[in-house]
Amino acid sequence: MNRCNWVTNDPVYIHYHDHEWGIPVYEDQKLFEMLSLEGAQAGLNWITILKRRENYKKAFDQFNIDIVANYSEEKIQSLLQNPEIIRNEKKIRSVVKNARLVIEIQKDFGSFSNFLWNYVNNQPIINHWSKDEEVPANTALSKKISNDLRKKGFSFVGPTIIYSFMQAIGMVNDHLITCFCHPAYIHNSK
């Protein structure tokens, strides 16, 4: 089975690639989870976060936006002592702050999903890369979304983090055309 070249033989990576990466996500809680995990990944390897994902979900109340937005200082301090997650204070505090800002977006746009998917007219961008080197680290669109989120007060939403987020939630499908998850591969194999 042909997969994208970045996938190792680690079962966690294989499952993520085969069942999540590039598949559209529209549910606000899942979108918030992925934004938070992408922020946690900044400066680290993605597999480091993927392997701690269940710990993050447990620590952050399954990324329930309303619960996280109301975390007390005591809860934040307990997260800073949690050895099961990356104990970076700026990253932990950003999850709480970003949850509060997601709630503001939900009030203004009906949902976080509406806000995000509007950038691509509710249609995933399907790229046709044949080599890893062709896949960008960020794009003009990820820069725009990053700037818009920063203006709203979000943190850990730089253009590269946002592009990874867009890939993770399927706003962008960057599976290589040789990968069995790419629509062209699926279409051509029939």
Image: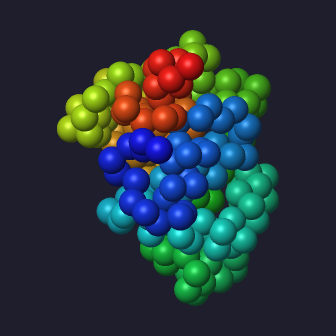
Looking at the image, is 47 positioned above or below residue 22? Answer: below
**Observer-nearest of 35 and 133:** 133
Image height check: is 181 above or below 43? Answer: above
Find residue 101 and report its horizontal and vertical position in percent: 63, 43
**For residue 106, side relative to residue 7 (left or right):** right
Q: Residue at x 37, y 32 (%)?
A: 178
Q: Quadrant of the C terminus?
A: top right
- Residue situated in front as seen by the camera: 1 or 177: 1
Q: Residue at x 35, y 51 (%)?
A: 6
Give the colour scheme of this rendering: rainbow
Q: How many numbered discs? A: 0
Please, is residue 36 above or below residue 29 in the view?
below
Q: Is any part of residue 60 visible from this angle?
A: no
Residue closest to the far left: 133
Which residue corresponds to the image point at 73% horizontal and 37% vertical from the top-left? Answer: 27
Which is more toward the observer, 22 or 154? 22
> Which residue, as the protein is rendered here, is positioned at the far front?
190
Residue at horizontal 40 percent and vertical 53 percent from the top: 7
Residue 118's spot in the image, x, y percent? 59, 18
